[in-house]
Image: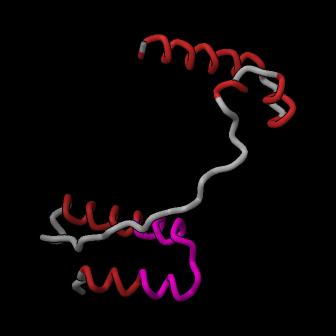
Amino acid sequence: MHVQTADVTAYVTTRQTEKAANATINRELAALKKMFSLALAGERIHRAPKIAMLREDNVRQGFFDREQFGTEAIYRRYAIVDEIMLREAAEKLASAERSQV
């Protein structure tokens, strides 16, 4: 069986017609890309089709801003109970920011 770029494009069109989200289709395409890259590495195929990823408009909501990091708002909003892990994360973030300056 020979899968060509046109076959992948047709698959994407079909999934979009089925109202699958771009993020869902991208996860499927990522698995397909991985399959082809493994097949190339294992010399099972000689060429892989071009697989273009779709644009995703799924901006995450519910994350905190840098100003909120280490504040009481995080404890209330995310019910973080392990204060030691939070402090370690804050220290790593602060250290990374200092090293960039």
* Residue 17 % position (x, y): 52, 88
Q: Residue at x 54, y 69 (%)?
A: 24
Specify whether residue 78 is painted magenta: no
Residue 13 is a magenta residue: yes
Q: Residue furthest left?
A: 46
Q: Is residue 18 left or right of residue 36?
A: right
Q: With 16 as the anchor, is 66 left or right in this view?
A: right
Q: Nearer the viewer, residue 10 or 65?
A: 65
Magenta stretch, overall SS: helix
Q: Quadrant of the C terminus?
A: top left
User: Image point 19% across, 63% down: which residue?
Assistant: 40
What x and y, as percent, mark residue 38? 27, 61
Bounds of the magenta span?
A: 12-29
**Which image quarter is the N terminus in?**
bottom left
Q: Residue at x 69, y 40 (%)?
A: 63
Does 21 sit above or below residue 90? below
Q: Quadrant of residue 92?
A: top right
x, y percentage for residue 27?
48, 64
Image colouring: secondary structure
| Residue shown at the point (42%, 80%) measured from the top left | 12
Could you say which is closer to the camera, residue 2 or residue 80?
Answer: 80
Left or right relative to 77: residue 54: left
